Image (cartoon, rainbow, N blue to C red):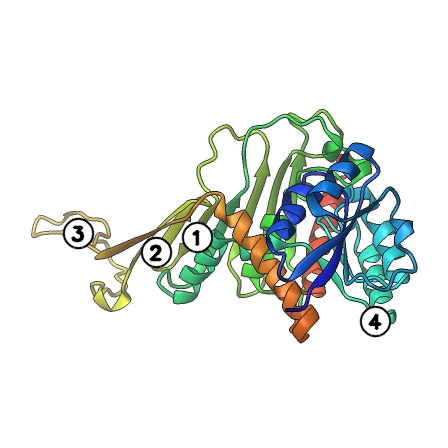
Amino acid sequence: MKHLRVVIMGQGRSGRDIHGLHLKKDTERFKVVGVVEPLAERRNRAAEEFSCETFSDYKELFGRTDIDLVINSTPSNLHFDITKDLLEHGFNVLCEKPCVPTVEQFDILCSIAKANGRKFLVFQQSRFANYFLKVKEVIASGKLGRIVHIGIQFNGFARRWDWQCCLEFNGGNLANTGPHPLDQALNLLDYYDGNPNVFCKMDRCNTFGNAEDYVKLILTAPDRPLIDLDISSCDAYPSYTYKVEGTRGTLKGTMAHIDYKYFKEEEAPKQVLVKETLTSGEEKFPAYCGEKLNWYEESWDGDPQAPFIAAVQTYYDQIYTLFTEDIEHEIKLNQVRQQLAVITEAHKQNPQIS
């Protein structure tokens, strides 16, 4: 089996604990041949963990032709300059999210990648999380009828004081956590040929930085359900991850457990519109619409840790087939671009968070 030779840039939470953790297990297909990390302690540890070369500066890679992919898991504010530099020097790049702050920067990277015949990928692995795939499966089954409203909550209660709560580092809830549920939301909206209508309210609540830690984002598009996304750090009672309301039923659940109930149209009592006053019995007592529906209830249980592990696995499965069989990755650049356009509009509507 062909090995893809990979260099990981950064040994932080993403570079080491997500990409590195996976690549240490997926050794039949991938080989980590280098790690770029400015901290000597992390370089030394990476050399032991991966049995690879280490570098303090990514520019030491320039001129190499034996590297299939560079994973850019550096701090968010460095993504654009480093990815641009790598693409211009002939490397294929997988960039962590948030990719870049603006659509304009993203278009530049896409243009450079195309001009140099390089692959440019963005790590949006949550598209493949098992709970999200279950939500999509239930929606696609038609059991809930026409979908009217999709509520998504990536909430919790937390105070934050690291670099990711600072705007100068492209921080904030929408940039840090947001790319996960926003990618899912836009995938459910399935309006990639246009731009959805966006309403956004941001606030700073418990953060020690200057970026937002509360986001309410509403997306609408013609003939699509309304999508209501919350990313709040001041919710001490988070109740669900997904709530989907349809004309024949509802789904509600978390990343670990989902319930959904629905009725079958063919089994429902036949009703006709009555415009006259509704009454009950010969005495003509006041009446209200009421009927008995035969509800069907189903549930799904998943390992709360599995969404992250399985999603990364699927993402890397598609990286491998992209490089070895030229099969297109499901996370397409125009989809990432749409996400960045939504984020840009959200910040435009909240000039106090700038």
Quarter that holds the N terminus: bottom right
In the image, 43: left or right of 306? right
Which amino acid lies under the numbered mark 1 shown in the image of this protein? Val
Residue labelled with disc 2: 249
For the image, the number of numbered tags is: 4
- Mark nearest the camera among 4 and 1 is 4
- Mark nearest the camera among 1 and 3 is 1
**Residue 227, image x, y percentages:** 54, 52
Residue at 43% x, 45% y: name it: 303
Residue at 64% x, 54% y: name it: 124
When asked about the image quadrant of residue 209, the answer is top right
**How many residues crowd around disc 1 within 10 Å: few (fewer than 14), some, or many (20 or more)?**
many
Which amino acid lies under the numbered mark 4 shown in the image of this protein? Gly
**Of pointers 4 and 3, the one earlier in the residue sequence:** 4
In the image, 287: left or right of 237? left
**How many residues crowd around disc 4 within 10 Å: few (fewer than 14), some, or many (20 or more)?**
few
Between the C-alphas of marks 4 and 3, the distance is 73 Å
**Of pointers 1 and 3, the one earlier in the residue sequence:** 1
Residue at 49% x, 43% y: name it: 305
Between the C-alphas of marks 2 and 3, the distance is 28 Å
As drawn, the label of residue 244 is 1
When asked about the image quadrant of residue 69, the answer is bottom right
Q: Nearer the viewer, residue 181 or 48?
A: 48
Provide the secondary structure element on which disc 3 rests: strand
Residue labelled with disc 3: 279
**Of pointers 2 and 3, the one earlier in the residue sequence:** 2
Q: Can residue 184 be seen in this view?
A: no
